[in-house]
């Protein structure tokens, strides 16, 4: 115990913060292969409360660290609920951060967040002002949002005492007896009386009305296909086929990780048939990512975990494998020299499946033997063939063969381990960083140097400060 | 006529490799790998939905138990590969409804169904042998035996066991277990005690039967070991002084695997290093189905089980059941009685006991009903 007391306060703060950011990068409170959803939620919630109570300013700045939407929402809600603890000098920054984080969220998540404010009984001037500001900023798409998220908007308007335009007010509060001047509202009204009118509405709204009009599922899906978003099409791949009409999806419209997950959801035969289309889609996506933030690597090797546990859970289907596959393609395009080593070798990454044991030591050794500049390991950290062999291998490798750490080795972990509030590490000698989307790779690698224990707390704070500036300016 | 396959004397893992284990809670699962599986022997699972099965073993002898599934064995005589047709196509036996209870009537523990297929009731085959063992009774009507034993024989002989579902963590351990490529079997440890061993002919069969371990029965002590025990944290290390280049590291990793393999073999010593007493049940082409029991050593864990070996004495199928202490003692007592022609005094003398001690022992082990009431009263007074 003496050791813990001897740790300087700064060191403790740095470790706490690293732990928290790591959790926020990977955890979404959903079920994982080894943990249940409840455990994940409880563990993460505790971590949020702990950091909020002890390091409020840094907690707030984490919003800019590139963490996932789920955790951004948690942070905003917790900050709004405890507004009176904010110090006067931090108030402005906190407000700005909350506002810009909220505005960067996808609309469905942002509206849900505002709804959560009501559910959690948060009612203060700041929360109301932020909701109002968001509503005003959505002015140009407000009608569409009102139709698509009607129940949420209605609840938010009630909670915040919004003074809405008369027509919007009538629409939200079910005064539908007279016709609207707005075209979209009028279509929505007509959809209640005519089965033909529903096909101009957003898919989720039309779906409910289709049931009301007793429209057969296959006819409805064929008619509404034009109104579906890419995600809706993705979600309906299986069930639309069952219903009798296949909703066609354009893989080029999916983000990289979603695309990888879509590929993994296809049977091997289909992947082979659609090979050129899928590979083209991957290339297009990667070009856009690299165009946005150009990353250049030298000689890179990746050790990728495709063991059975990378199949994820029923809530995060094949997510760890999807991240590995997406990173594989991203690195292949952005590195001068690239080699991938899977835990069970695959001839073609497009045909990869979650199968077999986790043997990280052998592929890692092959990767190190090819003398790269950077080795990226993507795994949930459950090394079992043999157990903890990677830790042993790295200990001897760093001790005898590479004492100056010329080769940097980074472990990216897509899975949060609820038991110890952290990601499962492979070895104390290499940094472990959370990852949820392959698109975040540049941010995650930047953050890895702190996870390695090289940076001090001051540097970490400076890094977060820079990210905050970037977010607020951009 | 091919040479007859000899009886199994010890369980040898020839042709199988032991891979590093995976643990969850108190459960440790050790994979067994077969690089070159045979293709002319397959096992399929057939599920039963009855609450109770009555198996007619021989004339006037029934085996009654809950039987969740059976295994159907298919083989080819000419070594050609067997296609994976399911075991569910045949409906067998008679079904009865007894109130809310569904009862299956099955015929024999191992029953041939067509020219090249055999249905066996896994573990029940071994358990039936265990129950019948040393339980024939004496040809002489010793006066110390009770009236019931003298007029109706010794039966019924009963044993209790628990289902795999009642062992804590086992269900999760099987769910999260990462099945190796080429894996054909598993050694199951609960709190580092060997609880079961399971081997099948091919990796495909294993994938299909992996979860059937949950439906097997286990000794009741494993319930407590699963609940209160823990799997220890084993680790193999690399000697850093011997490593100077990548080749050394590769060798060190291989050695690490070897260490794991041999240590886990040592952990399974209770079954691997034991002399077995085996009995041939069925000969199917080049394969021999046998059941066995370890030597009933009271100092060690004892097992019963069944196995299929081929003409090269490679293990193609194995399933074992770990006897509890009491079950071992019961079998040992019956063994001793049978050895001395079921005469109480002689049995007691041979073990250096008095008659009273033997009677008390029999009563404690549940065989009191075999003893004449007068003798029991007399022993109780002393």
Image (cartoon, rainbow, N blue to C red):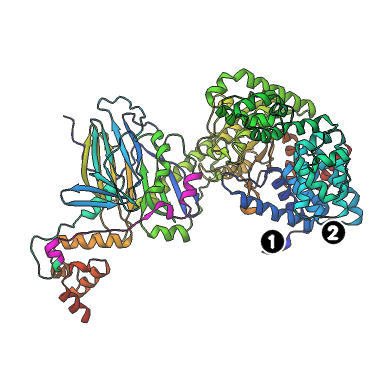
On the image, the x and y values in percent for residue A303 come to 61, 34
Question: Which residue is denoted by mark 1 in the rendering?
Answer: A3
The boundaries of the magenta stretch are B148-176
Q: Residue furthest left?
A: B140
Which quarter shows the C terminus of chain A? top right
On screen, residue B10 above or below A122 = above
Please indicate, yes or no, whether residue A457 appears anywhere in the rendered image: no
Q: Disc 2 sits on a residue from what chain?
A: A
Q: x, y (%) of residue B140? A: 7, 63
- Identify whether A211 is placed above or below B171: above
| Residue drawn where x is 85% and y is 37% of the image | A138
Per the rendering, the mark at residue A85 is 2
Front residue (pair A92, B295): A92
Q: Which sits in the foreground, B101 or A216?
A: A216
Q: Earlier in the sequence, mark 2 or mark 1?
A: 1
* C-alpha span from label 2 to label 1: 32 Å
Identify the chain of the residue marked 1, using the numbered disc in the image: A
* Pointers 2 and 1 within a single chain: yes
Q: Residue furthest front?
A: A177
Left or right: residue B281 versus residue A28 is left
């Amino acid at each position: 115990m003496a050791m813990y007391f001897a740790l300087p306060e700064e060191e403790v703060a740095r470790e706490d913060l690293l732990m928290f950011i790591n959790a926020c990068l990977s955890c979404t409170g959903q079920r994982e292969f080894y943990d249940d959803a409840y455990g994940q939620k409880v563990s993460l919630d505790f971590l949020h409360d702990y950091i909020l109570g002890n390091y409020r300013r840094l907690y707030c700045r984490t919003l800019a660290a590139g963490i996932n939407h789920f955790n951004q929402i948690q942070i905003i809600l917790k900050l709004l609920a405890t507004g009176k603890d904010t110090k006067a000098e931090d108030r402005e920054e906190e407000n700005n951060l909350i506002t810009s984080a909220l505005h960067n969220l996808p609309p469905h998540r942002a509206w849900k967040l505002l709804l959560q404010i009501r559910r959690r009984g948060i009612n203060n001037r700041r929360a109301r002002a932020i909701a109002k500001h968001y509503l005003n900023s959505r002015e140009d798409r407000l009608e569409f949002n009102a139709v698509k998220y009607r129940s949420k908007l209605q609840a938010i308007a009630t909670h915040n005492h919004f003074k809405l335009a008369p027509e919007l007010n009538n629409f939200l509060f079910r005064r539908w007896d007279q016709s609207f001047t707005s075209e979209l509202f009028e279509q929505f009204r007509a959809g209640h009386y005519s089965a033909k009118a529903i096909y101009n509405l957003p898919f989720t709204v039309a779906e409910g009305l289709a049931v009301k009009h007793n429209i057969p599922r296959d006819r409805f899906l064929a008619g509404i296909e034009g109104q579906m978003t890419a995600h809706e099409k993705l979600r309906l791949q299986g069930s639309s086929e069952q219903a009798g009409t296949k909703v066609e999806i354009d893989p080029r419209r999916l983000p990289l990780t979603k695309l990888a997950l879509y590929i993994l959801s296809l049977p091997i035969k289909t992947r082979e048939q659609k090979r050129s289309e899928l590979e083209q889609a991957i290339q297009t996506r990667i070009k856009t990512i690299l165009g946005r933030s150009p990353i250049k690597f030298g000689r890179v090797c990746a050790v990728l975990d495709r063991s059975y546990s990378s199949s994820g859970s029923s809530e995060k289907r094949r997510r760890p494998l999807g991240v590995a596959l997406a990173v594989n393609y991203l690195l292949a395009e952005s590195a001068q020299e690239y080699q991938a080593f899977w835990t069970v070798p695959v001839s073609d990454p497009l045909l990869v499946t979650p199968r077999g044991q986790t043997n990280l030591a052998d592929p890692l050794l092959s990767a190190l033997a090819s003398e790269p500049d950077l080795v990226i390991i993507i795994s949930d950290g459950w090394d079992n063939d043999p157990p903890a062999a990677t830790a042993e291998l790295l200990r001897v490798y760093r001790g005898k063969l590479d004492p100056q750490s010329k080769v940097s080795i980074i472990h990216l972990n897509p899975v949060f381990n609820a038991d110890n509030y952290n990601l499962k590490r492979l070895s104390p000698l290499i940094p472990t960083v959370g990852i949820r989307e392959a698109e975040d790779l540049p941010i995650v690698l930047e953050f890895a140097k702190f996870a390695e224990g090289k940076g001090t707390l001051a540097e970490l704070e400076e890094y977060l400060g820079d990210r905050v500036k970037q977010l607020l300016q951009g | 006529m091919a040479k007859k396959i000899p009886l199994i004397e010890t369980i040898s893992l020839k042709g199988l490799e032991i891979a590093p284990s995976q643990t969850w809670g108190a459960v440790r699962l050790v994979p067994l790998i077969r690089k070159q599986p045979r293709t002319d022997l397959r096992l399929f699972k057939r599920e039963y939905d009855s609450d109770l099965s009555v198996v007619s073993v021989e004339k006037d002898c029934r085996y009654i138990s809950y039987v969740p599934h059976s295994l159907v064995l298919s083989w080819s005589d000419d070594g050609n590969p067997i296609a994976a047709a399911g075991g569910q196509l045949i409906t067998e036996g008679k079904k009865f409804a007894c109130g809310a209870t569904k009862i299956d009537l099955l015929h024999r523990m191992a029953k041939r169904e067509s020219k090249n297929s055999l249905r066996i009731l896994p573990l029940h085959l071994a358990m039936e042998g265990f129950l019948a063992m040393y339980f024939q009774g004496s040809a002489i009507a010793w006066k110390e035996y009770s009236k019931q034993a003298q007029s109706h024989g010794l039966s019924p002989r009963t044993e209790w066991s628990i289902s795999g579902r009642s062992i804590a963590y086992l269900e999760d351990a099987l769910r999260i277990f990462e099945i190796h490529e080429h894996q054909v079997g598993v050694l199951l440890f609960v709190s580092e005690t060997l609880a079961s061993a399971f081997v099948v002919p091919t990796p495909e069969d294993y994938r299909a039967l992996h979860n059937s371990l949950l439906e097997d029965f286990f000794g009741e002590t494993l319930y407590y070991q699963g609940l209160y025990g823990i799997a220890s944290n084993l680790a193999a290390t690399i000697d850093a002084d011997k490593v100077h280049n990548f080749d050394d590291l590769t060798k060190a990793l291989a050695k690490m695997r070897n260490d794991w393999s041999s240590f886990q073999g040592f952990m399974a010593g209770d079954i691997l290093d034991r002399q077995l007493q085996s009995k041939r049940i069925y000969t199917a082409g080049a394969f021999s189905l046998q059941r066995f029991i370890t030597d009933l050593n009271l100092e060690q864990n004892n097992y019963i089980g069944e196995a299929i070996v081929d003409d090269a004495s490679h293990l193609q199928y194995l399933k074992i059941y770990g006897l509890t202490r009491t079950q071992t003692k019961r079998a040992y007592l019956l063994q001793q009685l049978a050895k001395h022609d079921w005469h109480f005094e002689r049995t007691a003398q041979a073990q250096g006991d008095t008659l009273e001690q033997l009677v008390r022992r029999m009563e404690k082990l549940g065989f009191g009903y075999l003893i004449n009431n007068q003798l029991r009263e007399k022993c109780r007074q002393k």
